[in-house]
Amino acid sequence: MPARPDYGALAEGTLFGRLRAGCAEDWRRYVAHDFVRALADGSLPEAAFRHYLGQDYLFLIHFARAWGLAVYKGESLEDMRKAAANIAAVLDVEIGLHVAFCRGWGLDEAALQALPEASQTLAYTRYVLERGGAGDLLDLHVALAPCVIGYGEIGARLAADPETRLAGNPFREWIEMYAGEEYQEVAANEIAELDRLEARRGGPARFESLLRTFREATRLEADFWQMGLDAAG
C-alpha cells in the first residue's frame, strides 16, 4: 500500500498532538485495540463487525446532530458554514454510503433503523452532545476529535503496517476507506481546525479541561470497539 502519514509527526506542535500525548496510554488502547488488530489480519468475527456497523449507523445520526450543535455554537459565518457543510456531508453522503456498505454485510436500512442503541453508543454520543452543549465550539471539536482524527490514524497505521493482510481480508474495503486520501484529508483538516479554534478560544488555563474531554471521548471510542467484540461472544 502507498505510504501514509505518521500521525506522531503530523501531530507535532498541534493541540491534537498535546492532547494525544496527554493520554498516550488511553490513545494506544483505542488505536491498537484488539478489534482493530483483528480487522488488520482478517480474524474479526463477522458478528462483531456487523454489530459494530449497525451501531455506527446510529452513531452517524447523532454525529449529524453534533454538527447541528456546532452551527448553533459557531461564532462566525465561517464557523456556521463549515458545520453546515459537515451536516450535509453526513446526512446526504456518509449515511447513504454506510447503508450501502452495510447491505453487503446483510443489514438493510430497515434493519438498521430498527436497531436499539447499545449502552456504549448511548454513552459516547450523549457525552459528545453534552460537552458541546455545556461548552463552546472548541469543547465540541475536542470531544469529536478521537473519532474524526482517530479513524484517520487507524487507517494510516493499518496501511503502513506490513502485518496488515489485504488479500482475502473481508475488511479490506473498510481499511482502505480510512487509509484513503479522502479520509486522510478529513483528519488533517480537523487537526488544523482544532488549532484554529484554540488560537481564538484556547489558552493554557483551558488545557486540562480539554484533555479531560479528549481522554474520556478516547475511552468511549475504545469501549465502542469492545462492544463489537463482546457482541460476538
Image (spheres, helix red, strand yellow):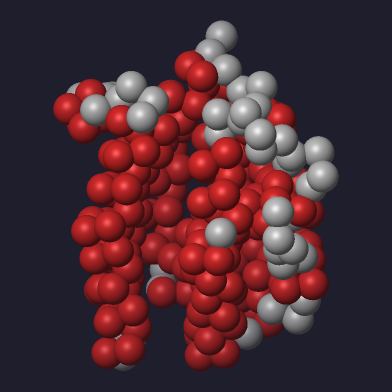
Of residues 200 and 176, the one drawn nearer to the viewer in this rendering: 176
* Residue 211 pos. (x, y %): 65, 63
Q: Position of residue 167 (x, y in %)?
A: 66, 34
Give the image location of residue 76, x and y in percent: 31, 90
Q: Is residue 102 above or below residue 24?
A: above
What residue sits 55% from the left and 29% below the top?
170
| Furthest residue in direction front, as rendered | 167
Q: How many marks?
A: 0
Residue 62 visible, this angle? no
- Work out which quarter of the rendered image holds the C terminus and state it: top right
Residue drawn 27% across the image and 90% down it: 77
Q: Is residue 107 visible?
A: yes
Residue 98 in percent (x, y) is at 34, 43
Viewport quadrant of the N terminus: bottom right
Q: Residue at x 57, y 39 (%)?
A: 172
Q: Quadrant of residue 32?
A: top right
Of residues 203 and 172, the one drawn nearer to the viewer in this rendering: 172
Residue drawn at x 57%, y 17% is 45
Whether residue 207 sits left or right of residue 94 in the image: it is right
